[in-house]
Image (cartoon, grey):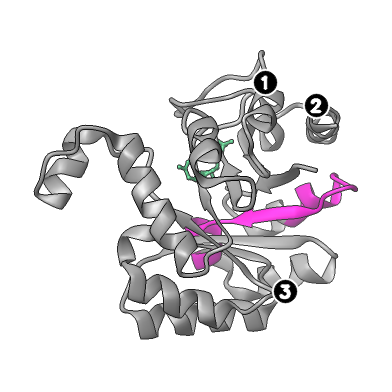
Amino acid sequence: MTELIVAFDMGSGRDALLLAARLPQLRWAKLGPVLYVREGPALIREFAQRGVRVFLDLKWHDIPNTVAGAVTAARDLGVSMATVHCLGGRAMLGAAASAAGPDLALVGVTVLTSHDAAELESILGRGVPDVGFEAERLARAALQVGLRGIVASGHEVGFLREVLGPTPWIVVPGIRGPGDPAGDQVRTIEPAEAVRRGATHLVVGRPITEARDPAAAYQRLVEALD
Ligand code: C5P
């Protein structure tokens, strides 16, 4: 069954925990750099103690030894899923996968959604005729060295599921119901459609965190996944 991950992108750990307490069936919480830099490991421990799995989305990209050390620290803290950049290269990804062990699922960010073909060309110093092909190439390299899965937008998930087969996790952010404001998201997808196209995990932030009734919004999404 597809898992629902709530992105806690608020300004304080206190607000995050207050909201979490209003979502009684909460299984996964995504913590990103803003809240992590502010609150540190204590917030991860707090979520873990409440039986909520933590997805630590810090998108690591550094030399292999440093990333492996960060992954080990996350594993020791009880983090259940974390992100690394596939552009960090095979050695870095392999070191990260070895450090993660069986309890921490590592997923790779292939091409940032803020990057279009022109931006990617300027980074790589070569032509990029097809961003989807670059995402596939990076995903394959990450999976070959032992990552559990990848992060993909709703527009790529169907294609990537087709080419990568049934096993890898595909974590999809940018989820919006029919009435939800897109906010700054460009490549949005409805929850049931993301599941149909092969997503294993949906990341939902503002449609829950900024809803008038977050618990009801969360419940509607859980039902859409059923
Ligand atoms: O509020 P919203 O549902 O748009 O939140 C989506 C979450 O997923 C945010 O935490 C955002 O940082 C994250 N994300 C994303 N696009 C990516 C990778 C992560 O929106 N490509």
Q: Check disc 2 and report the residue beneath it.
A: 224
How packed mark 1 is, by other alpha carbons closer than 10 Å (few <14, some 14-19, many 20 or more), is: some
- Name the amino acid, label 2: Ala
For residue 155, above or below residue 142: above
x, y percent for residue 195: 69, 32
Q: Which mark is residue 152?
A: none
10 Å crowding of disc 2: few (<14), some (14-19), many (20+): some
208, 169: nearer the viewer: 169
Q: Which comes sooner in the sequence, label 2 or label 1?
A: 1
| Furthest residue in direction right, as rendered | 24
- Where is the N terminus found, in terms of image quarters? top right
Which labelled disc corresponds to residue 45? 3
Q: Which residues are magenta?
A: 17-37
Q: Residue at x 30, y 36 (%)?
A: 131
Which mark sits nearer the N-terminus, 2 or 3?
3
Q: Position of residue 204 (x, y in %)?
A: 64, 38
Q: According to the image, label 1 marks what residue?
A: 177
Residue type marked 3: Arg
